[in-house]
Image (cartoon, helix red, strand yellow):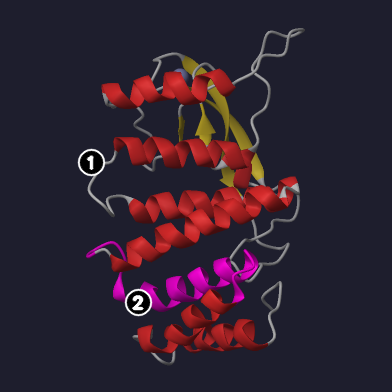
Amino acid sequence: MTKLETVGIMCQNCRKPFKTQKVISTNEFGGKRTDFHAHAAGPQPLIHQVYTCTHCGYSTMPREDGDYNTTLKESTSWKIKEEITPLLTVNKKTGETNPIPGSLKYEWAAKILEWESSGIEGDDIRKIADMYLRASWCCVDEKDTEAERYFRLKAAHAFDVALETYGEVEPEERAILTYLVGELYRRAGHVVVAQTWFDQVKQEVTDPKAQEWVVAAAEQQRTSPREWFG
Ligand SMILES: [Zn+2]
């Protein structure tokens, strides 16, 4: 079962404390979709793997070092105030902020990281791509197919830029990410574009034995696609 723990975090933006659920442990017993969306037995951890401040909407993925004490750029704080904070709604009875869908939390985290990154094309793009991918996975659980498609295309584009950016992707990851871009386009309905990505997977392989499964997966999804691995 997925284990959660309530933790208090000091918001990096508005400097107020907020409570969030931290994932202590989880599992993949619910299987894995062919876009690497893993399902847990019991509660799904995905929505708890991104933190959103209930006061201002500032969102971020958990930091390994637990240090949330850095300061955001002034321009980022201003954009959060303009674009994100107004989207928070309050429960009139309890006075608490209404729950925010996981897809929105990841989208906000991606936008904030884009605003924070230096503005150089490709900077932090790998992390941003991951956030949009996770937003699309949340949409599957939220049963919002239109938003799912939107986030799949955002993620595919961002992974594409990451693959083009020097130093963003390790050589041994290139085949897997190339496959993933193909699968994201396929799931978004861009079948022809997807095929060109699946065709490229073989050329990106660095370790034929260890990456045999990626080549097989690309061939599978190109010819007779499956929803789940295994
Ligand atoms: Zn805040």
Who is closer to the viewer here, 94 or 25?
94
Q: Is residue 1 magenta?
A: no
Image coords of residue 227 (percent x, y): 71, 72
Residue drawn where x is 47% and y is 16% of the image? 17
Label 1: element kind = loop
Which span of residues is magenta-colored? Answer: 166-191
- The type of residue carrying mark 2 is Glu
In which quadrant of the rendered view does residue 142 lie? top right
Q: Name the residue under label 2.
A: 172
Image coords of residue 175 (percent x, y): 42, 78
Label 2: element kind = helix
Tag 2 and tag 1, C-beta contact below 8 Å: no
Image coords of residue 64 (percent x, y): 38, 43
* Label placed on residue 118: 1
Q: Which of marks 2 and 1 is nearer the N terminus?
A: 1
Give the alpha-carbon distance from disc 2 to disc 1, as whole Å: 27 Å
On the picture, is 207 further left or further right than 33?
left
- The type of residue carrying mark 1 is Ser
Pointer 2 local density, CA inside 10 Å: few below 14, some 14–19, many at least 20: some
Who is closer to the viewer here, 11 or 105?
105
